[in-house]
Image: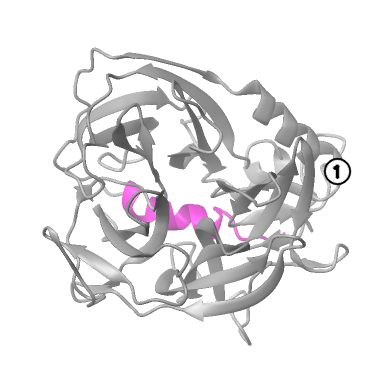
């Protein structure tokens, strides 16, 4: 059987999760707010039916979303299984496996975009000239600028034969034409070294501030056992053309090697949005190994401090070989009282991903909350 599970994208998130750790904010704080959660049946059924019957996309992880200029929604995925689901609900052993893809949801009609051909699909964005078994891009968060879709790229290289034998090597930005997801360009970004052997992974979350004219990009300092959020910004509309600024202890500077930690315990992917009067960061709880908890932190300022750790949901799939990871909210899909949250599901046993095609797919949850509306 030829495959890349856990998948590699999941393995990146788990390299820290399997190591016990202690961290500030390790236990969720009591919360008197009203919070309830339920499965989002509309998204669950839409993507489940498509995956089972379209003969195209059968599952993926990452699951960022961004609204496109024509009113449709682009779903941004990293590791992706293609092909068909068999009569037993499984994946054939020769199912194509890609490192990134996009599905456009046009009022319930789903279209998958990849590279290559429909008969022989390839990743939508590939490292130029590279063997994708050794060097590839995963997708981060995305935004629309000047009518073009900009997707954050995280480049990884394989360093050995084991599932955890790979490392992050740098960031770039892909520009795609949203009309047909044609790749227009790839723009490399400067490295952001931190510590002796680490680089910040930019693109964990993007926040567009309509008031101050900046696009804010959150990144992760991934030290395996501990992960810290960092923050950068660029004038709105110039993600690939203007110099970035990096937040360091209350000031903004131009040195990509100088930025400060603003929160410990985030997953590699998370979200930041304005929700009920405060900046709200939603993440899988990376302060404990293999956590089933999806938690929220809040702040009056985008730059933090983010406090008041509150559990929003516990993923029911977690247990045995099955784990969940990289939870995030989708503010483009929610409303003033509801956070639409997705998270990824995977298994430590690679065969599980073929026996049950429904396992390796995002899950969708509506979290209804009344939290009290603070000032900005």
Q: Is residue 262 left or right of residue 357?
A: left
Residue 285: x and y, percent? 32, 38
Picture quadrant of residue 113: bottom right
Magenta span: 1-17
Q: Is residue 101 left or right of residue 141?
A: right
Q: Nearer the viewer, residue 302 or 168?
A: 302
Q: Is residue 50 left or right of residue 158?
A: right
Look at the image and tell me in which quarter the C terminus lies. Answer: top left
Q: Nearer the viewer, residue 192 or 330?
A: 330
Question: Around disc 1, counting alpha carbons within 10 Å, would you say few (fewer than 14), some (14 to 19), or many (20 or more)?
Answer: some
Picture quadrant of residue 181: bottom right
Residue 286: x and y, percent? 30, 43
Q: Nearer the viewer, residue 166 or 73?
A: 73
Which colour assignment does the render follow? one colour
Residue 38: x and y, percent? 52, 17
- Does dot 1 land on a helix, a strand or a loop? loop
In the rendered image, the vertical position of residue 56 relative to residue 259, given as above or below:
above
Residue 266: x and y, percent? 30, 46
Residue for point 57% across, 70% down: 174
Q: Nearer the viewer, residue 12 or 267?
A: 267
Q: How many marks?
A: 1
Residue for point 21% across, 40% down: 306
Look at the image and tell me in which quarter the N terminus lies. Answer: bottom right
Instruction: Tell whether position 81 is magenta.
Output: no
Return the residue at label 1.
54
In the rendered image, the vertical position of residue 324 relative to residue 57, given as above or below:
above
Q: Residue furthest left?
A: 249
Residue for point 67% across, 58% down: 101
Instruction: Tell whether position 9 is magenta.
Output: yes
């Amino acid at each position: 059987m030829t495959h890349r599970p856990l998948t590699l994208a999941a393995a990146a998130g788990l390299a820290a999760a399997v190591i016990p750790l202690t961290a500030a904010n390790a236990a969720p704080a009591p919360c008197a707010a009203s919070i309830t959660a339920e499965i989002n049946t509309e998204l669950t059924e839409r993507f489940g039916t498509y995956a089972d019957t379209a003969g195209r996309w059968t599952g993926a992880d990452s699951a960022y979303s961004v609204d496109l200029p024509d009113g449709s929604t682009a779903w941004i995925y990293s590791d992706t299984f293609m092909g068909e689901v068999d009569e037993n609900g499984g994946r054939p052993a020769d199912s194509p496996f890609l490192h990134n893809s996009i599905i456009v949801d046009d009022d319930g009609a789903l279209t998958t975009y990849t590279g290559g051909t429909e008969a022989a699909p390839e990743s939508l964005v590939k490292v130029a000239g590279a063997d994708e078994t050794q060097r590839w891009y995963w997708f981060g968060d995305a935004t629309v600028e000047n009518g073009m879709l900009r997707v954050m790229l995280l480049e990884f290289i394989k360093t050995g034969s084991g599932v955890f034998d790979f490392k992050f090597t740098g960031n770039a930005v892909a520009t795609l034409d949203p009309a047909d997801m044609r790749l227009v360009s790839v723009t490399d970004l400067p490295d952001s070294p931190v510590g002796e052997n680490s680089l910040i992974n930019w693109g964990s979350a993007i926040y567009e501030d309509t008031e101050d004219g900046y696009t804010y990009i959150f990144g992760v300092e991934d030290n395996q056992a501990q992960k810290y959020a960092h923050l950068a910004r660029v004038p709105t509309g110039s993600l690939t053309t203007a110099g970035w600024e990096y937040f360091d202890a209350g000031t903004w500077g131009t040195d990509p090697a100088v930025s400060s930690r603003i929160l410990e315990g985030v997953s590699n992917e998370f979200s930041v949005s304005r929700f009920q009067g405060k900046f709200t960061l939603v993440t899988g709880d990376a302060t404990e190994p293999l956590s089933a908890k999806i938690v929220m932190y809040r702040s009056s300022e985008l730059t933090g401090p983010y406090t008041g750790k509150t559990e929003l949901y516990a993923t029911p799939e977690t247990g045995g070989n099955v784990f969940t990871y990289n939870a995030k909210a989708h503010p483009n899909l929610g409303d003033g009282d509801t956070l639409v949250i997705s998270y990824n599901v995977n298994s430590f046993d690679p065969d599980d991903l073929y026996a049950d095609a429904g396992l390796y797919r995002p899950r969708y949850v509506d979290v209804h909350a009344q939290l009290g509306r603070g000032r900005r």
